[in-house]
Image (cartoon, rainbow, N blue to C red):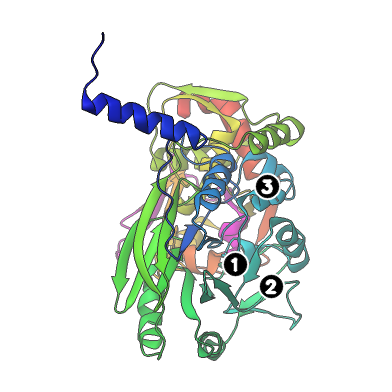
Amino acid sequence: MKRYSLHCVLGLLCFFVAGCAGGPVAAKRDTSAKIVLLYVSDLHSQIVEDHDDLGGYARLAQYIKSERENAGPHTDVVVVIGGDLFGKGRVPCRETNDAACAPLVSALTPDVVSFGNGELKFPNRELAKLAEKTGGTWIGTNVASVRGAKFWKASHTYVGTKSGVSLAFVSNTVFPGPGEARGGSQFDFAPTETFDSEYLAATKSGAAPIVIVHDDKKTLETLAPRLCAQAVKPLLVLKAHEHLEEQGKVECLKYVEAGSFGRQVARVEIRKGAPSVDKVDLVKMDAKIPADPALRERIAGLYKSAGHQAHRVLVKLNSARDQDHVAKFLALSYQKTSKADIAIVNSGAVKDGLPAGQIDWEMLMNVIPYNNQLMGLDWSTADLEKSLCLAARREKDRRLDNGADLVFFGAELKDAGKDKCRLVVNGGKRNPKIVVDSYMVARSARWLGKELKGKTFSYGLDTERAVELGVERYGAKEL
């Protein structure tokens, strides 16, 4: 007769008990009362995974769905998107001005969506149509309409009760730079007093405040003295805009930023009672997270209808190219396709380098996300040199000069910022043709040292077409 150890008998007993209960023993469900806050920002319509297999809306949706399904009976899950939901997106989103991709956001079941500077570039009515498709309550505490018109359904704040805790969300959003807004500037800052009074009103009823800051860390340093002086201090700051993956503290303000493009989610546990943040984790959206099959199918359908050129291979790179190399190629594409002598682009026009291997159209557009019109300058060489050298000596501003380093093709600015600064034009041409883009024109007074209104002409090309031609003609050699 076969003998069984006590350990084995107990194991079998556990197995049969579990079987009678309806299946294998599951992990113990957390029955404590709490809020699980899931935070992402700067999604920028990156609806599919990146080249390193991180992110994608289908994974985000499945992760959020699992968190909601596995929450205990006394736990509420709150999903917050911290701005820059749209813009710079994948090909189907770019081709439809985000109209085809906005409905996908509803699968993420957002509770609160904050304005980012990307949203404020849209005309008011166009943004309203997109926002109605995403779900969630849109907030913009420091945002106002320049015409005094009310937002569609947006609020200054969001106050709601979750797991028996009243939460108040307020937001502080950085505004687009000059010339970035489409359809004219339709949004403006609300007065500082408005933000402070909205914060105070939201907390008077006993709500625990959570502040969304879509701006750089300098803004946290500006807000900290005012917010830390309040009777009710912020429970947490959800930071966005800088695409960082970090946690930290500025005075009394604890903050977290989960990076960009949905590659990570900040998972925050908030306990009841006197509400407190117990735990903050940055959860990677990698291959361990299954994808929602229905949403993945919807996204595949979008590529068939509006993104069939996305995966057209343009060039094969034997080695990776850094951001500076891609910026130089962009300048080359501007110069060659417009048949100008000098091209000038700003470093912020290129957001990343390129990996080794096959580069398709969508990969290139993710790296060069902005589509501007190519413009010629009606300037003499002397005027151009004088203006560029003047601009190089100015004091840099953290916002207005973000991405303002100039990249030249066909010329070089030597000793920039010094008294002996000079512009050296290839071939020594005295009155060269100059090409920039419409964004550089909008920033011209600061970045090029001279206001360009009335001194430009169109080359009849935009960034996308110039890059496409540049790759076709020079990609194998220059990229």
Which circle, 1 or 3, is nearer the viewer? 3
Q: In terms of sequence position, does the residue under pointer 2 or pointer 1 come before the other? A: 1
Q: Residue 115 carries which label?
A: 1
Verify CB contact (< 8 Å) between mark 2 and mark 3: no
**What residue would you read off at disc 3?**
104
Q: Is residue 371 left or right of residue 252?
A: right
For residue 379, say whether it is visible.
no
Verify CB contact (< 8 Å) between mark 2 and mark 1: yes
Q: Is residue 223 left or right of residue 249?
A: right
Neighbour class for label 3 at 10 Å: few (<14), some, many (≥20)? many
**In this view, 277 is above or below 246:** below
* Residue kind at label 3, given as amino acid type: Leu
Residue 51 pos. (x, y %): 47, 33
Q: Quadrant of the N terminus?
A: top left
Mark 3, secondary structure of its residue: helix
Q: In terms of sequence position, does the residue under pointer 1 or pointer 3 come before the other? A: 3
Q: How far apart are marks 1 and 3 (CA)?
A: 18 Å
Residue ID at (47%, 74%) = 211
Asked if the magenta segment contains residue 62, the reply would be: no
Depth order, front residue of 297/475: 297
Residue ID at (70%, 36%) = 298
Residue interval drawn in magenta: 414-442
Q: Residue 154 carries which label?
A: 2
